[in-house]
């Protein structure tokens, strides 16, 4: 019984010292949750940096557009000044023509032709400016689309890498848990086999002890049968002895059963 209690105590210590599968699963989930939180924080920081970089790019593009618009305004102002200068020169020519008695029809024709050429030049410049702005807008849109596609590809690759890593970690945790469970089972079976071996040995010792006790009891019974069988004969043989000797022999015969009973019990105790 003491051996059985010792084995049970050892088994309890083993089970209490090792975490249960539920605790191992909970720990693995906590580690995965912390890792996911850390990766999410890193991804958020990267996305924030990407947005900041994109906003800086957009701000730079806006500044470039403003510079282009400023250049267009300067160009228009220059064209307006040139037109005014041309009109001033035309007026001077008209005045000079009048002074020189030129015909009014010729002066009007010259003025119309000059105005027509000026309008065509202005229209051509405006068309060129419109085409330039359209090309710049298209180029900017293409760059924005390419940047968005690049960010999406990076995010998708990161997501796939995260899924692969999570699957690998899950497999490693399951393998570790399986090996730990296998080691616990092997240790438990080894302890159980050892306890069964010890119980078998204890049972053999108890069997031998019972056999010795049975042999002692059999020897005692044989002795009692032998004494009871021969005590009458010994008493008859004492009839011819003196009275004092006969009484002494009778006392010894009477005390013999008591000694016989004490002797086997003492041997059994030993």
Image: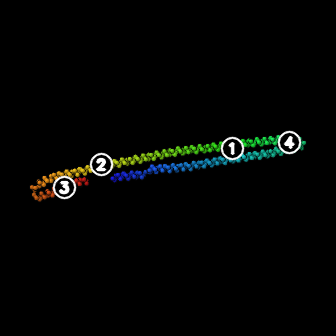
Q: Position of residue 42 (x, y in %)?
A: 57, 49
* N-term mark: 3 or 1: 1
User: Do the numbered discs 3 and 1 sit on residues whose CB atoms are within 8 Å?
Assistant: no
- Seen at 18% across and 51% down, the residue is 225
SS state under label 3: helix
Q: Which mark is residue 137?
A: 1
Q: Earlier in the sequence, mark 4 or mark 2?
A: 4
Residue 188 is left or right of residue 117, and the answer is: left
Q: Are marks 4 and 3 in contact (CB under 8 Å)?
A: no
Q: Secondary structure at mark 1?
A: helix
Q: How many marks?
A: 4
Q: Secondary structure at mark 2?
A: helix
Q: Which of the 4 image quarters holds residue 162?
A: top right
Would you call the spot at circle 3 few (<14 residues within 10 Å), some (14-19), or many (20 or more)?
A: some
What residue sits right under mark 3 in the picture? 257
Question: What is the distance, in whole Å, between disc 1 and disc 4 at their CAs?
Answer: 43 Å
Q: Which residue is mark 2?
A: 204
The label nearer to you, 4 versus 2, is 4
The first of marks 1 and 2 along the sequence is: 1
The answer to which of marks 4 and 3 sits earlier in the sequence is 4
* Mark 2 vs 3: CB contact within 8 A: no
Q: Helix or strand or loop: what does disc 4 sit on?
A: helix
Residue under pointer 4:
108
Q: Residue at x 55, y 44 (%)?
A: 160
**What is the CA distance from the residue labelled 4 to the residue labelled 2?**
143 Å
Mark 2 neighbour density, 10 Å: few (under 14) some (14–19) many (20 or more): few
Q: Residue furthest bottom?
A: 244
The quarter holding residue 85 reads top right
């Amino acid at each position: 019984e003491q051996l059985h209690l010792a084995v049970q105590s050892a088994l309890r210590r083993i089970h209490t010292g090792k975490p249960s599968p539920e605790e191992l699963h909970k720990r693995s989930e906590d580690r995965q949750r912390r890792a996911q939180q850390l990766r999410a924080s890193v991804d958020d920081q990267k996305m924030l940096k990407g947005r900041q970089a994109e906003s800086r790019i957009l701000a730079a593009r806006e500044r470039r557009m403003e510079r282009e618009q400023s250049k267009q305004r300067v160009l228009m102002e220059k064209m307006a000044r040139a037109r005014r200068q041309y009109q001033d020169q035309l007026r001077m020519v008209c005045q000079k023509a009048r002074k020189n008695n030129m015909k009014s029809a010729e002066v009007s024709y010259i003025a119309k032709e000059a105005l027509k050429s000026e309008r065509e030049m202005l229209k051509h410049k405006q068309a060129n400016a419109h085409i330039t702005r359209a090309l710049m807008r298209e180029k900017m849109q293409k760059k924005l689309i390419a940047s968005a596609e690049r960010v999406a590809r990076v995010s998708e690759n990161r997501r796939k890498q995260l899924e692969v890593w999570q699957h690998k970690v899950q497999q490693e945790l399951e393998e570790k848990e399986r090996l730990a469970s296998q080691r616990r089972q092997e240790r438990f079976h080894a302890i159980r086999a050892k306890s069964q071996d010890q119980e078998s040995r204890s049972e053999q010792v108890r069997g031998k002890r019972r056999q010795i006790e049975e042999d002692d009891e059999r020897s005692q019974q044989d002795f009692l049968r032998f004494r009871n069988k021969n005590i009458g004969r010994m008493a008859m043989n004492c009839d011819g002895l003196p009275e004092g000797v006969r009484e002494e022999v009778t006392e010894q015969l009477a005390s013999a059963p008591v000694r016989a009973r004490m002797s086997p019990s003492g041997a059994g105790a030993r």
